[in-house]
Amino acid sequence: MPIFTPKTVKTDASDGAGNPCGPYRAELYSDSGELTQFGAFIEVLPPGSKSSIKHWHAREDEMVYMIAGVAQLHEGDTVTPLHPGDVATFKAGDPAGHCLENTSNEDARYLVIGTRSAGDIVTYPDDDRILEWDRTKKTRRWTDHAGNPASNPYQE
């Protein structure tokens, strides 16, 4: 059984340049263990950053468990603060777009767990974008809501 620590786990990070969501850091635990059925990682959002553009998944469930700090959960037209110990769940197919935003002066740290389906359709309701991707073929296709080819909204 592999054991990973914050010093040995695979990581991902961005300084936020060219990304409308800003900087982040992530500890990729499920990737480190080569898990295929679900994803699990700890993400850290510095003040002013967002987890993503508001979106929802057609085929993947997601769950967020707040570890430290406070993040604002944007879901549909509602904004709710998440505090350490709070959990938010997002059922596949529920068309309420969601994302987290750190509006505080301290880092927000949370665990994300989600399904790893063979493919998914991710809708970005506020940005007129849809992402269709296939994990086995490693393909991604961005369209607008009408189905026309479109740009990736994460690249400014």
Image (cartoon, rainbow, N blue to C red):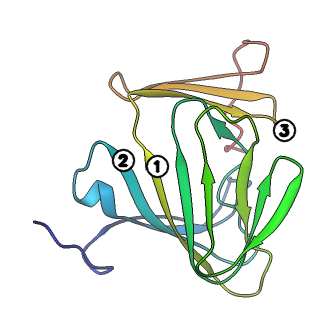
Q: Sequence-wise, which precedes: disc 1 or disc 2?
A: 2
Residue type pointed to by label 3: Asp
Q: Is residue 109 above or below residue 98?
A: below
Judged by depth in the image, the label closer to the viewer, 3 or 1, is: 1
- For residue 114, the mark is 1
Report the number of numbered marks: 3
**Which disc number belongs to residue 38?**
2
For the residues labelled 1 and 2, the Cα–Cα distance comes to 6 Å
Res 135 → quadrant: top left
Which one is in front, 35 or 147? Answer: 35
Label 1, secondary structure: give it.
strand
**Amino acid type of the residue that numbered disc 2 sits on in the rendered structure:** Phe
Toward the left, the furthest residue is 1
In front of the other: 152 or 67: 67
- Pointer 3 residue: 126
Q: Residue at x 18, y 73 (%)?
A: 3
**Position above or below: 116 against 40:** above
* Amino acid residing under circle 1: Gly
Give whichever of 146, 40 is nearer the camera. 40
Dots 1, 2 in contact, CB < 8 A: yes
Image side of residue 100 versus residue 84, left or right: right
Sort mark 3 into few (<14), some (14-19) or many (20+) by Cα contacts within 10 Å: few
